[in-house]
Structures are given as structure tokens and as C-alpha cells.
Amino acid sequence: MRTKKTVASYSPEVRERAVRLVLDGAGEHPTQWAAISSVAAKIGCTTETLRDWVRQAERDAGQRPGPMSAERERIRALERENRELRQANEILRKASAYFAQAELDRRSKT
């Protein structure tokens, strides 16, 4: 039997609070990973999920190299627009070929 993967969605407030708990509680733990593990267990998410949130918060704060959240969202929007434009162009190409063929068929019958 196959089980369907479910994705838990956490509110932005929960994410921000969890990240703040990790960053503020870093002094109480020997490593950041220990802080992440502790907070993840308390809020009920996986340690890897919380680690991703912390890394993104560090990128947004300029403490870590990589794209900021706003840049990532802009890239996603541009990729989505690009995909839609490619699909529209493909539809127009097919329509153009269809009408060109129809015109050739019409000419050959007269």
C-alpha cells in the first residue's frame, strides 16, 4: 500500500518564532544544530525544515551568501511567466501551421 506524502504548512508567524528561538537560544546549546533540534521538537516540525528556515533567515539578513527571499520569489515569478510564454508561443506556432495548411488545401481545390 502506498502512502501519500503530506506537507505540513506552517504560518509565517510560527516560522519567524521558531527561527528567533533558534537564533536567540544559540548560546544555550553547544551548536546551532543542537538548538535547531531542540526547537524543532518543541514546535513539531522536522529538524531539516527548521534548518532551511534558519538558513533562509540568515541569507535574508545578509549573514550568509545566496538569494534572498524576495529574489527567490522574483525568480519563481519570472520562470512561471517564461513557461506561460513558451506555451503560448507553441499554441501560436501550431495554429499558424494549421491555418497555413488549410490555406494550401483551399488553393489546391480551386
Image (cartoon, rainbow, N blue to C red):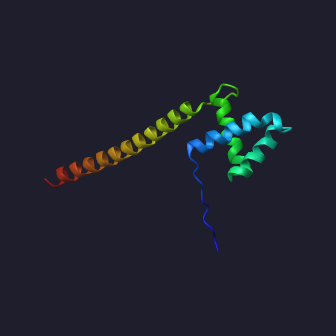
Q: Residue furthest top?
A: 62
| Residue beneath the point at 35% across and 47% down | 91
Q: Position of residue 76 (x, y in %)?
A: 51, 38
Q: Position of residue 41 (x, y in %)?
A: 74, 52
Q: Nearer the viewer, residue 79 or 69?
A: 69
Would residue 63 appear left or right of 89 to someone viewing this image? right
| Residue beneath the point at 65% across and 27% down | 61
Q: Residue furthest left?
A: 110
| Residue beneath the point at 57% across and 33% down | 69
Q: Is residue 102 above or below residue 16?
A: below
Q: Position of residue 63 (x, y in %)?
A: 70, 26
| Quarter-of-image position of residue 35 | top right
Q: Position of residue 50 (x, y in %)?
A: 69, 44
Q: Residue furthest right?
A: 30
Q: Residue furthest bottom?
A: 1
| Residue beneath the point at 60% across and 30% down | 68
Q: Nearer the viewer, residue 68 or 84?
A: 68
| Quarter-of-image position of residue 53 | top right
**How many marks can you see?**
0
| Quarter-of-image position of residue 62 | top right
The quadrant of the picture occupied by the N terminus is bottom right
Would residue 9 appear left or right of 84 to someone viewing this image? right
